[in-house]
Amino acid sequence: HWNYTHTTEVYDSSDRLWARIDRIKLWRFYLPFHDVNFHGPKDVYFLCDRWPEAMPPETSTAGGNACCVVRLKELSDLKQPALQLAGARVMLSPVELDEYLHLQRPDDKKAEWLFGRAAAKDAVRFLLRDVAGERPFMADVEITTDAYGRPLCRPRAGNQQTVAGPVEYPYVSIAHTAGHIAAIAAQTPTVGIDLERVVPRDESFLQLAFDEEEQRMLADMDDRDEWVARFWCAKEAVGKGLGRGLPSGPRSVSIGQADPRSGTIGVTLGPALAE
């Protein structure tokens, strides 16, 4: 019990007392730390917060369109290599941990990979709790990728328990930018999310990212910088939702309409993505 104190004795190879330490308190820390009662049940805590403002319209946990969107604020304290590794051992399945340990990228990019998956796992855990009453641990939810790099969700290898409710493990999509991470889990396979900061963009970016009609639409918007970000996110989210990215670059998806009041954007697929 965590309140107990202990006496530890160390003996040498001849069974002679070598050292004694009195009144030790032993603690086991469960990362991540975010609002976690270390001594409570670990299947009810979440690293992320729900993000209802980012939910698609007319979605709920009832019926065929159940989904959940979460966001994760920057965790600078957990990006240090030692704490990052400790967090990985708690949050990842054995298969994921092996992949993490063999990542050939800088520590900040490893953190992006790790916490992106943590966000996806939390979105899945929220959704499974809402829809099926399931309470998996973070490491029970395994995120892999297909041949195109699309994240796929499944029960941890060796733990093939199926969800008792109306959904299997859901589909997921992950987005990150400038230290912020978002993820969505949904029953539909066509699910994508993207995240960008609203910043001024120069003309060279606009010409690369948007065709003439899209640039004309942007010129008519009151807050062009925000709508540039929205247009770009729409293209990326559609590419992620279809599981193929943008095979022909930004022109793989064309913006056909945009409603300033609702924020809804309508798109058309280019030939490569449509195929």
Image (spheres, rainbow, N blue to C red):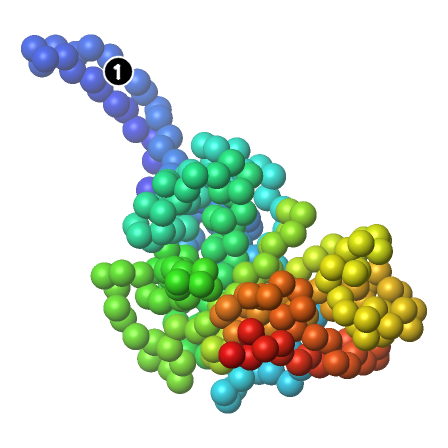
- Please give the name of the residue rendered at 48% of the width and 33% of the height, measured from the top-left corner: 81
Amino acid beneath label 1: Arg
Q: In the image, what residue occupies the spot 60% across and 66% down?
A: 248
Q: Is residue 54 visible?
A: no
Compared across the picture, whether 271 is left or right of 129 comes to right
- Element type at mark 1: strand
**Can residue 274 be seen at all in this image of the molecule?**
yes
Instruction: Pick the residue in front: 37 or 189.
Output: 189
Picture quadrant where residue 3 is located:
top left
Examine the image and state in which quarter residue 272 appears: bottom right
Q: Residue at x 48, y 55 (%)?
A: 118
Identify which residue is drawn at 7% across, 10% down: 14
Using the image, determine if residue 55 lies above or below residue 11: below
> Residue 16 lies in what quarter of the image?
top left
Q: Is residue 83 above or below residue 132?
A: above
Give whichever of 111, 275 is nearer the camera. Answer: 275
In the rendered image, residue 41, in percent from the top left (x then y), is placed at 40, 56
Label 1: how many residues lie within 10 Å, few (<14), some (14-19) or many (20+)?
Answer: few
Number of labels in the image equals 1
**In the image, farthest residue toward the left:** 14
> Residue 25: percent from the left, percent from the top?
37, 30
Please say if 168 is above or below 245: below
Residue 180 is situated, as x and y percent measured from the top left of the image, at 64, 52
The percent coordinates of residue 15 (x first, y second) are 9, 14
In the picture of the structure, the residue carrying the numbered disc 1 is 20
